Image (cartoon, rainbow, N blue to C red):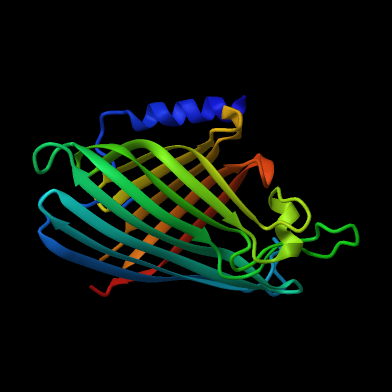
Amino acid sequence: MKKIILFILLSILFFHHNPVKAQDAIVIPDTLAGWQTSWEVGLNGSQASYSNWAQGGVNNISATGATTYSSLYREGRFGYGILINLRYGKSQIDDEGTRKIDDRLYIQNRFLYDLGDEGSIFKLFSNIRLRTQFDKGYDYGANEDGSDRLISRFFAPAYFTEDIGLAYIPNDNFTYEMGFGLQQTYVADQDLAPLYGFDENENFRSEAGLTIGASYQIDLAENLTYGTSLNTFTNVGKALSSTDIHFNNKLVGRINSFMNATLNLDFVYDDDYSEDWQVAQVLSLGVSFNLR
């Protein structure tokens, strides 16, 4: 019930009249002609060291790398875009070794076709997405003997989605769409498959359902931008309460042309893995460069 209430509140938020855009959304401007490419690379890090410090503390050093590549194309009423978003980070903590602090591999292909005149606010859309991670992930100290429990690794799990439907895009900052989609879940490590709702000797699942997507971006102040995206998948053979939800938020504050502070706050609901919300929050300070 709490999940459904939150989902309704988020939907109301996305219908708000302010212009919007998202970190996981491909925006293809109606004014674009031909190709437009961008590539941003960033590095964030932190370090702390203590010696005879009364307040206490643990020596640590961490670093996270991120890159976002997008390529957009528009010709007449047809538009295409590809987005690749990669993040990976590690932290070295005294007496605890090295731990992963961020890990993401996301690829999206998007197709648009204007309904009616060129530049129409109503469009046919289709998306093809991949979500997974690069490295092993652990639930630290989760085993009965206090050891770490392996819960994920490369392509374990991996999620593929394909959807098609109708999009409402009144400007370059707002997108709301609904459609029909397919979703495949693949777990490359058979030992991890039961964690994601698979029976013995199974590691692949394909589902059909309804999809909703929305994106939002707003400049809160000069050099301060908030972007968010919401994507849902409702299996037609399951209850509404089993809807998969991905809600991603990103707040970026620009210090100068290459330094920035970033807050990523992501929420995921997938009851094949857990009936509780998955939450990831990463606050970082670092540098970023536009290579194109």
Q: Is residue 263 above or below residue 114?
A: below
* Residue sitting nearer the eye, 210 or 137: 210
- Outermost right residue: 145
Residue 201: which quarter of the image? Answer: bottom right
Residue 207 in picture, x, y percent from top left: 55, 44
The structure residue drawn at horizontal position 44% and vertical position 31%, both measured from the top left corner, is 10
Q: Is residue 198 left or right of residue 220?
A: right
Lateral position of residue 195 relative to residue 250, left or right: right
Q: Quick one: quadrant of the N terminus?
A: top right
Q: Give 199 or 66, whichever is nearer the viewer.
A: 199
- Which residue is located at x 10 percent, y 59 percent? 33
Q: Can residue 162 be seen at all in this image of the molecule?
A: yes
Report the number of discs: 0
Q: Which quadrant of the view contains residue 144?
A: bottom right
Name the quarter where the C terminus is drawn: bottom left
* Image position of 35 with respect to 231: above or below: below
Depth check, front residue: 99 or 84: 84
Q: Position of residue 42 (x, y in %)?
A: 38, 70
Q: Residue at x 76, y 63 (%)?
A: 191
Q: Is residue 24 visible?
A: no
Residue at (38% x, 64% y) in the render:
84
Residue 105 drawn at (x, y percent): 48, 64
